[in-house]
Image (spheres, rainbow, N blue to C red):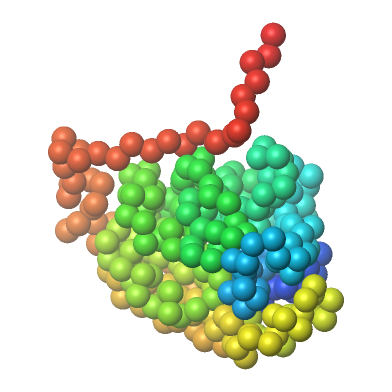
Amino acid sequence: MKDQLLKVALAQISPVWLDKIGTLKKIEASIKEAAASSAELIVFGESLLPGYPFWVALTDGAKFNSTIQKEIHAHYAQNAIVIERGDLNTICDLAAKYKIAVYIGIIERPLDRGGHSLYASLVYINEMGEIKSVHRKLQPTYEERLTWSPGDGNGLVVHSLKAFTVGGLNCWENWMPLPRAALYGQGENLHISVWPGSDYNTKDITRFIARESRSFVISVSSLMQKENFPADTPHLDQILKNAPDILGNGGSCIAGPDGEWILEPVLHKEGLLIETLDFNRVLQERQNFDPVGHYSRPDVTQLHVNRERQSTVRFDEE
């Protein structure tokens, strides 16, 4: 049955770092290439649009009231994505044109939180070009907290795609048991993990989640080399002084519902990685373990999830 098979593309690419327009062009080219290969879902890494905040760890990011940190951060914010102003419209148009669903990691500057703070968000666009969820990372990791804000549970939702039910998390959120359980409980059987770029992150957790959930797991990472920093980056000399040659080596991969590799982590290779997934394998592995079905005890343990979009103010209109 055709609905049982899903052709997926993992877009392991580097951004045009902190350049919204340049990175969008690369993303659009990848979508067209995936569509030419008849892919039905394409996934991009965490914060790819317009890039991961590598400078924080390289330039004393915790120094208070630093001119360097303020100026780089302002440049980051200028290149962040304001969904309400149509910054993702070209991607939505391509998704609709080619009937391809998209998961993409963005740096979001949302107007519903004032339009100034930044969030690492995972956006799902369906094959009709509609933005169906925007999941803001619940807990930025370590130095990320110096530039990203904590999100909320609004995006902890799943989506139907052919026979599959897909959901996703950002980077180290994938180590958080309760957000994983929130997606499992909604029937997720194709889990999307997005990362800034390292097999250090993907090589263990990808197979672990697959085995725990008896689902397919797609992990997508970006690439980043020292030479990828654009010449017009503010305080580039300070960034390059401590930057290693390789900041993101990829590591994109796919594990099957039995926890074994379908695609082992791919390193240092830019481009699309394409595989076809068979939904029937999910049903085979759920025969012996289903974490929210026959192998659960909701009478003993249950999870409560607040999916309300958080805001600083509420207005009661007359």
Looking at the image, which residue sits at the far top?
318
Residue 265 x, y percent position in the rendering: 45, 81
- Quadrant holding the C terminus: top right
Q: Nearer the viewer, residue 232 or 35?
A: 232
Is 187 situated above or below 31? above
Question: On the picture, is 67 further left or further right than 281?
Answer: right
User: In which quarter of the view is residue 146 placed?
Assistant: bottom right
Residue 20 x, y percent position in the rendering: 77, 63
Which residue is depicted at the point 31% across and 75% down?
A: 260
Q: Nearer the viewer, residue 123 or 55?
A: 55
Is 290 situated above or below 221? above
Residue 128 x, y percent position in the rendering: 66, 47
Q: How many marks?
A: 0
User: In which quarter of the view is residue 244 placed?
Assistant: bottom right
Looking at the image, which residue sits at the far front?
64
Which residue is depicted at the point 62% across and 24% down?
A: 314
Residue 203 x, y percent position in the rendering: 39, 78
Is 114 situated above or below 119? above
